[in-house]
């Protein structure tokens, strides 16, 4: 910001003042410049997070928005699906990127377990379900890796409990990407590659195991930055996390 622009902002024409005022005005100019840079850095950080989220979202949902995958399909999308199915314990061989009989059977088993039409074709509903489980696994890994397995399932359960609650967005994507909802989104740990136990935790939570006993919040007492969380009713503690509603 130049001195003329600063004068317009704070109503000062420096020519009216003697030389001793110039250092003060220069300091003000420097402060405004630093403030502008700080805002730009914050904007860049937020924009970067949104771009990463969009890229992840578009990659995961690309096929459900265009075409299904079936026998004979091949490519990176098929390989990605195979890797997710592998971590969910449905695909038991090396991912190749080719949709053959083994992949079809894995998809069919997955569909049967999750109440989908078990035809072995990866259509919109199947891909969306896989995507939801993958997003939950990312949160579980980012928020609770190193915790006991029960704690991982509890974190996954909180996400699903929020989806079912009228106080939160009604979708897995909406809950996870709600502003400041999860520390892992803010500090970037969400983007780490989830291990198999994180996927299993998402799966077990979806199938009804809820160690959190209906919690819609959890927090680590040693890392609380907003004391508002203490106003929630505590249900239990699992590992390092307190679960509340």
Image: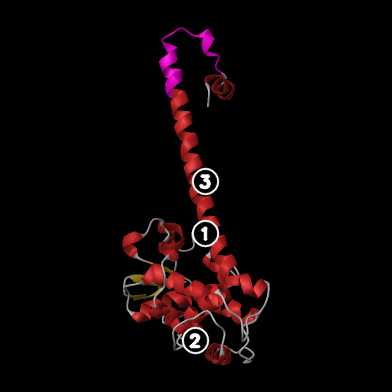
Q: On screen, 235 above or below 31?
A: below
Provide residue 161's location: percent of width, then percent of height.
52, 76
Q: Which portion, as a residue range, is magenta?
A: 12-27
Q: What element does badge 3 sit on?
A: helix
Provide residue 205's location: percent of width, then percent of height.
47, 82
Q: What element does badge 2 sit on?
A: loop
Mark 2 and mark 3: Cα distance apart in space: 40 Å
For label 1, the residue is 52
Nearest-to-viewer mark from 1 and 2: 1
Q: Is residue 4 left or right of residue 156?
A: right
Nearest-to-viewer mark from 2 and 3: 3
In front here: 241 or 198? 198
Kindly tell me whether residue 178 is visible in this rendering. no
Circles 1 and 3: CB atoms closer than 8 Å: no
For label 3, the residue is 43
Specify few, some or many for label 3: CA neighbours under 10 Å numbering under 14, 14-19, or 20 or more.
Answer: few
Q: On screen, 15 above or below 238?
A: above
For marks 2 and 3 on the same chain, the one whose residue lies earlier in the sequence: 3
In front here: 84 or 182? 84
Disc number placed over residue 208 in the picture, else none: 2
For marks 1 and 3 on the same chain, the one whose residue lies earlier in the sequence: 3
Give the main secondary structure, helix, strand or loop, of the magenta stretch: helix
Q: Quadrant of residue 62?
A: bottom right
Nearest-to-viewer mark from 1 and 3: 1
């Amino acid at each position: 910001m130049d001195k003329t622009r600063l004068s317009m902002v704070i109503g000062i024409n420096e020519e009216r003042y003697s030389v001793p005022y110039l250092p003060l005005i220069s300091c003000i100019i420097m402060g405004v410049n630093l403030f502008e840079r700080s805002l730009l850095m914050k904007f860049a950080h937020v924009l970067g997070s949104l771009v990463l989220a969009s890229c992840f979202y578009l990659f995961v949902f690309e096929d459900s928005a265009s075409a299904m995958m079936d026998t004979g399909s091949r490519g990176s999308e098929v390989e990605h699906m195979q890797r997710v199915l592998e971590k969910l314990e449905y695909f038991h061989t090396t991912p190749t990127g080719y949709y053959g009989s083994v992949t079809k059977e894995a998809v069919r088993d997955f569909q049967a377990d999750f109440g989908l039409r078990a035809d072995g074709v990866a259509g919109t509903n199947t891909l969306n379900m896989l995507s939801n489980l993958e997003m939950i696994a990312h949160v579980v890994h980012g928020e609770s890796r190193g915790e006991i397995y029960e704690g991982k399932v509890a974190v996954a359960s909180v996400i699903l409990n929020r989806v079912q609650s009228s106080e939160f967005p009604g979708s897995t994507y909406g809950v996870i990407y709600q502003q400041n909802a999860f520390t892992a989104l803010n500090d970037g740990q969400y983007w780490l590659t989830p291990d198999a136990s994180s996927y299993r935790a998402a799966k077990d939570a979806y199938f009804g195991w809820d160690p959190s006993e209906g919690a819609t919040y959890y927090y680590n007492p040693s890392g609380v930055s907003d004391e508002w969380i203490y106003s929630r009713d505590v249900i239990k503690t699992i590992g390092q996390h307190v679960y509340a509603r």
